[in-house]
Structures are given as structure tokens and as C-alpha cells.
Image (cartoon, coloured by chain):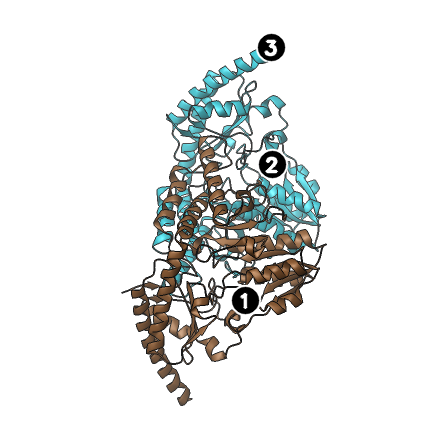
Chain colours: A cyan, B brown
């Protein structure tokens, strides 16, 4: 059976070059960077090289990069760190209404601990409303967290405009950007955004699961989340995940060097899929911005009359892997709060599917997937229609 | 040049079987356990199997195992979790004086936040003093943390006796055991210890860096450290490190199945090294308990008159890799607080070296290392003696 993997925003296959780095660190250069002998020094230099590589991908300094075990850990570290460091300066925290749970859950926790947390509303395409942001910002604001690319719709947030507002209305606030769904696929411009913090994850760009990073601007200081041996300049204790770190650096180099070409490629796959689906099915809706304005690797479609879970399983049986709801933990049966935040009809919310691409996908896969989708949606709509009549 | 790696308590080489698991998860079965399609289900089942495997190694329940990114994260999660959950029940926290920084640093942080933290003193062999523990325990005690095997001396702590005291004098306290230096090499008996929590790490037993676990008894509840997508039954959010998790399960199966044989083997290597060193050098001291009573894979020796750093570099140049000071972050130049806690002379503290073994080491390596050591210590003692006279 054909297998078409259009779920790359959940996770990606590790590429050969990143795998080779991980394998080398596991069996040849397996020292602990904290050891002072040759094997340790070798690992220490590899760790420094990875810092340099990822810093250069962000036009940042090597000492501003902290490796963590996941994007979630990096987001938690930043949010809880700012809350602890700045609690006396103010209590207001702003996060967009469409953040990933690794941002929204820490925010909700801080709300329960007495912080003044607000969620920035979004427009029907999933973009934060800048007027609402301006109204929410004040001198008590210690943290603003807005993701770069939304994991469900591919919406790119207006970070430059948001950054200007933040600097003007809450100059002391930390401006944090969750870049898990953008890094390595969409250009990152920390200087233009006037950002203070940024998070990227390895397993979304063909590095292994279990490695991510927090970039934190040198002038900004937060306490660590994990305490112990003092690794990562005291900011993230625990023996460094060298296989993950070296694979992440390699995967980032490949993704960043080819970013424009891969983006064109993924955008083309997406366009081919949408064109074919639109030609063969009526009543198909794009959730989020028009294709040209969205990130190249994410397409969210609704097929009213065909519920997502049913569609998902039909597609799965034909070897087409996509997702419904949130990227990272679809086992929950709740509807997607992100799709709901767009203010679209319940029928569209309930029939939303996310297709997410990588540079490994082809237009041929898009055509094959569209064919399966056409059959699936037609059959399910018929069946659900009949079912509805019977009741 | 020969390379003899006697620094296995810092980290180990990943074994072929664990590597194969990691590679499979990176390139073949690379789905996200949170995805509901075939690749996701495959990962989900692998995750469940790993829970079952590691639970059975601990005679525990699969749902009592939480995978984390490091032993440090697991220790932090437990300590900060208990502090948060139990702050109202009491403020007293007891940790041994010879804990790893991933326990002692969180404890010191809690001390700075108003908790009543005490350090349980040890005897000259590094064992906690049970009389001191009994005196420190009271009804306000919410947490007692004692490691199983000390990372610098190989001292095995009297956990059964400690557990009895805790249950009698502080029945509500959480009894936490850091087993990073024991799991897979020394038998773990959570029931006999009456323990509530236990931490094990993959990279000490030939699995990759970046994976560890917290075992927490079902009846005990703590809040999570990382919040987000709700992975690990809500206790540790973040996409699961599947390559690490599956490699850890495999490495644990191998280590636990062969534990007795490997322990005999490592003990023999250690004995050969000590015998050869004692025969060729005067003034050699074992720091910690007599060999028969210590963990099989750790030997800490002092060579008064030859400073550790100088020795370390001499050995390194001859391809013999050992460590001085703490296991995980020897780049610090401070003397080892653990070795100091034994109450031995400064000359012994300053000349202490740790030799740590794995099942991959041989008696031949021990003999070769002893030869290098004999030359090193003799030369350095001569040189340092001359130097001292000149001044």
C-alpha cells in the first residue's frame, strides 16, 4: 500500500544527515561534555559548534542558545522564568488565543496563581488583532507570547507590528515567540520583531524527538527551571543530549540553507492538493489565510458533512496520514480551540483536517491524496446524510 | 594509541541493540504517539511497551513510570513537585550530604524559599548516619531524598533501614531515591525500601543521553513540572523522545537480564586494577567502603602527593580516561564536596580519582591502566616533591 505522510507538523522523519550525527555521538564520540579527558573535550567542542550553528541560523550569539528536551520545556522555562523573575515588576501576561498548549497551559497555570493573564483575540484568519493587543498592553505587562506560525492553520503572525506595539506600550515586557512551527521553514527575523525570546524544536525539521532550544537575548535574565550540575551556563542542568543536539544542528543547517527552495516545493505540493480537491469536491473551505499568505507547509481544510475523525480513519486505511485537532496530542477528543477561535461554523470546525508537508513530499503524493480524499468525503457525506435522514 | 574508558559513571557508549532501537524510531517508525493514524499508533504502542518494560525492571506498574529528558529533570520534577503539593502539610526536607547536584541544588533552592532543609551527614565510608536521620525526622517532614549508589565512591546507602525509620517517624513523607548510578547495575528493591519515588537514567547504562525516568508510586500525587499537551498522563508534557525511550527500554532489558554476570565482571576488573595499583605504588587509599561492599562499577582512589588534575591529564595523554570530582560536570575546579564529606585529609581529597566501569571493560584494560597509573603517580610525586623543596 502507498503511504503518504502529510502530518509533518506533528513530527518528521529524521533525515540521513541528522541520523549520521546522532549515531556518531552515540557510539564514536560518546563522551560527556563535562568530562575533562579527550572524549569529553570532543563532546564539549561538538556542543560549542552546535551552539554556534544554531545561533547563526537565528543571527544570534552562541551563548544566547539553551538546549532543552522539547519545545514544551523551552516554552515552560521561558514563561515560568519570566513570571518568577518579574513578579514584582508587574503581573500582566498576554498570550495569543491560538497558542500551542505548551504556552497556553503555563499561562493558565499562572492565571490560577494570581497573575493577570489575558488572551489576545484573533481575526477570522487566525491573526492576532493588533488593536486588541494595543489595548491590553500596559506598564504592568511583563510578558507577551505570540507564536510565529500557527500549528493548525499555518497563519503567520504580524510579529514586526506586534513588536513595535510592545516596545512602545510595554517597553519592559519580554516578547516571546514560539517558533516551533516556523524555524527552518519560514524566515525568522528576531531583530525586526524586537523579540527577546524564541523557541525552536528539532523533530519538526527532520532531527530526532527530544531536542529543542530556547533563544534568550543576552540582556534578559531568567532563573533556570532545572537545577543541578550547571550545564548550559547554569541555565539548564542535566547531561546534554549530544545525539539530539548535533542532529538538530545538522538538520537546521540543511533546512536553513535550502529554505527558499523547500518552501517553493512545499507550497507547490499544497497548491496541487488544494486545486485537485477543489476540482473534485464541492463545499471545501480553507481555514486560515489564503495560501499565498500562509506558511508553505500547512493547509487546513474543512469538508462540511464529513466529520474529521471519520475522514481521518478512512484516509488512514488508504495510507494517507493527516491530522485533526492539535498537532501534538490528537488523542484527546476535544474539538480544536484554535479552529474554534477563527469564529467559523461548527460544521466547519467538526470537519477540519490539517495537511502538513515536508521537503520529502511530492506533487504526485498530493494528487494521490486528493483522489483518496474525494472518495472519502463523497462516501462519508452520503453515509452521514442518509444516517441523518433515518433518525 | 590504546584507549581505556574508565569513566562510565559520567556516561557510557550506546550499545548496538539500543542504537538499533533509536535508529528504527528515527527513520522507520517515526510517528508521533499523539497522532491517531497508523504511524502514530505504532509509536503509541512502542511507548506503552517501553512503559511496561521499565516498570517490570522496577517491579512497578507501567502507569507509575514517567519519561523525562534527564535524571536531573526527573529529580527536579519530584522535589519541586513534592514541595508544591505538600507545602501546607510541612516544610521539612531531608537530603543526604552526598547527593548529586540534581538533588542538592533543588534542595538548596527550596531552603532559600523558606523550606526547612537539612542535610543528613555521612560516616567515613559515605553512608548516611541512621542515628542522625532518626533525629532529623519529624511529622513536619514532607520529603526525604537519599541516593542509592553514590556517583563518586560507589557507596550503597542503607535504604531499607532508612525506609523503616521514615515510615515510623514521618509516615506521610515522600521517600525519594535517586538511582541514576545504580539502576541496571545494582539490584533495586523499591518494596523493601518502602520508597515512593525513584529516578533512573538511560545514558549510564548504554542508552543515549537525553532520556531518564521518574517512578512515582500510584498513591502519591505531585503536580507536573512541564505543562502543555498532556503527554505522560498529564505529568510530563512535550512530544515523547521515542528514540531515547525505546533505546532506554532495550538497554534496561539487557542490563537487568545480565546484571549479576556484569556485576561480577566489573567487580573483577575493579579488583584487578586495585591489586595491580596497590602492588606497584605505596600510599594508595580507597575512598568509600571496602570493595566487596561497594557498587561493582565505581572505585575511588587517592594518591597523596599527586594532584588529581595533573594525574588526570597525564592519564589522558596515555589514553586512559577517568575523572576527578563530580561525575557530570568536572569542568568546575572546585574540590569534590562528596569526597570532603567523608572527613578525609585534604591531601587525599586533592588526589582523588574515580575509575568507573561498564560491562565493556576487561581485566586487560585494568592491568594496562595500572601500569600507566604507576608511572604517572611516581613521576608526579617526584616532580611535586622536588617542586616543593625548591620553594
The residue carrying mark 2 is: A98
Give the mark count.
3
Q: Do the residues labelled 2 and 3 touch (CB within 8 Å)?
A: no
For label 2, the SS is loop
Q: Can the viewer see residue A266? A: yes
Q: Residues within 10 Å of mark 1 (few under 14, many from 20)?
A: many
Residue B372 screen position, x and y as percent: 31, 72
Which residue is found at the position 51% from the left and 77% from the top? B344
Which residue is found at the position 71% from the left and 58% from the top? B90
Q: Are marks 3 and 1 in contact (CB under 8 Å)?
A: no
Residue A92 screen position, x and y as percent: 70, 47
Residue B109 screen position, x and y as percent: 62, 61
Dot in front, 1 or 2:
1
The residue carrying mark 3 is: A390
- Nearer to us in this view, B171 or A131: B171
Q: What subunit carries mark 3?
A: A
- Nearer to us in this view, A253 or B369: B369
Q: Can the viewer see residue A172? A: no
Give the answer, above or below, for where A139 lies relative to B39: below
**Alpha carbon distance from label 2 to label 3:** 38 Å
Residue A323 screen position, x and y as percent: 50, 30
Which numbered disc flags the more N-terminal residue, 2 or 3? 2
Give the answer, above or below, for where A189 lies relative to A353: below
For label 1, the SS is loop
Amino acid at each position: 500500500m502507498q503511504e503518504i505522510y502529510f502530518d509533518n507538523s506533528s513530527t518528521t522523519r529524521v533525515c540521513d544527515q541528522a541520523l549520521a550525527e546522532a549515531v556518531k555521538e552515540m557510539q564514536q564520540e560518546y563522551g560527556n561534555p563535562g568530562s575533562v579527558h579527550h572524549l569529553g573535550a570532543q563532546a564539549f567542542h561538538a556542543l560549542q559548534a552546535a551552539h554556534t550553528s544554531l545561533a547563526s541560523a537565528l543571527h544570534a550569539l552562541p551563548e544566547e542558545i539553551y538546549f532543552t528536551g522539547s519545545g514544551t520545556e523551552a516554552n515552560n522555562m521561558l514563561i515560568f522564568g519570566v513570571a518568577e523573575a518579574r513578579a514584582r515588576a508587574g503581573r500582566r501576561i498576554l498570550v495569543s488565543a491560538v497558542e500551542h498548549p505548551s504556552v497556553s497551559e503555563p499561562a493558565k497555570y499562572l492565571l490560577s496563581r494570581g497573575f493577570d493573564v489575558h488572551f489576545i483575540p484573533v481575526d477570522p484568519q487566525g491573526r492576532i488583532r493588533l488593536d486588541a493587543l494595543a489595548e491590553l498592553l500596559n506598564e504592568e505587562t511583563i510578558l507577551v507570547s505570540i507564536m510565529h506560525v500557527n500549528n493548525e492553520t499555518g497563519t503567520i503572525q504580524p510579529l514586526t507590528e506586534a513588536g513595535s506595539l510592545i516596545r512602545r506600550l510595554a517597553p519592559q515586557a519580554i516578547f516571546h515567540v514560539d517558533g516551533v512551527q516556523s524555524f527552518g521553514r519560514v524566515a525568522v527575523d528576531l531583530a525586526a520583531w524586537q523579540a527577546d525570546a524564541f523557541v525552536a524544536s528539532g523533530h519538526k525539521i527532520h532531527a530526532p524527538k527530544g531536542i529543542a532550544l530556547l533563544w534568550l537575548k543576552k540582556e534578559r535574565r531568567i532563573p533556570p527551571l532545572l537545577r543541578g550540575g550547571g550545564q548550559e551556563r547554569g541555565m539548564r542542568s542535566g547531561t546534554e543530549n549530544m545525539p539530539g543536539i548535533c542532529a538538530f544542528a545538522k538538520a537546521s543547517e540543511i533546512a536553513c540553507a535550502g529554505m527558499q527552495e523547500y518552501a517553493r516545493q512545499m507550497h507547490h505540493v499544497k497548491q496541487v492538493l488544494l486545486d485537485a480537491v477543489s476540482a473534485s469536491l464541492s463545499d471545501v473551505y480553507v481555514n486560515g489565510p489564503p495560501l499565498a499568505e500562509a506558511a508553505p507547509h500547512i493547509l487546513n481544510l474543512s469538508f462540511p458533512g464529513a466529520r474529521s475523525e471519520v475522514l481521518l480513519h478512512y484516509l488512514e486505511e488508504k495510507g494517507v496520514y493527516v491530522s485533526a485537532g492539535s498537532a501534538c496530542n490528537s488523542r484527546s477528543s476535544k474539538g480544536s480551540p484554535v479552529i474554534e477561535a477563527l469564529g467559523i461554523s461548527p460544521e466547519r470546525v467538526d470537519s477540519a483536517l490539517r495537511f502538513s508537508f515536508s521537503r520529502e513530499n511530492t506533487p504526485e503524493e498530493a494528487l494521490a491524496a486528493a483522489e483518496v480524499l474525494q472518495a472519502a468525503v463523497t462516501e462519508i457525506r452520503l453515509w452521514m446524510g442518509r444516517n441523518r435522514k433515518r433518525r
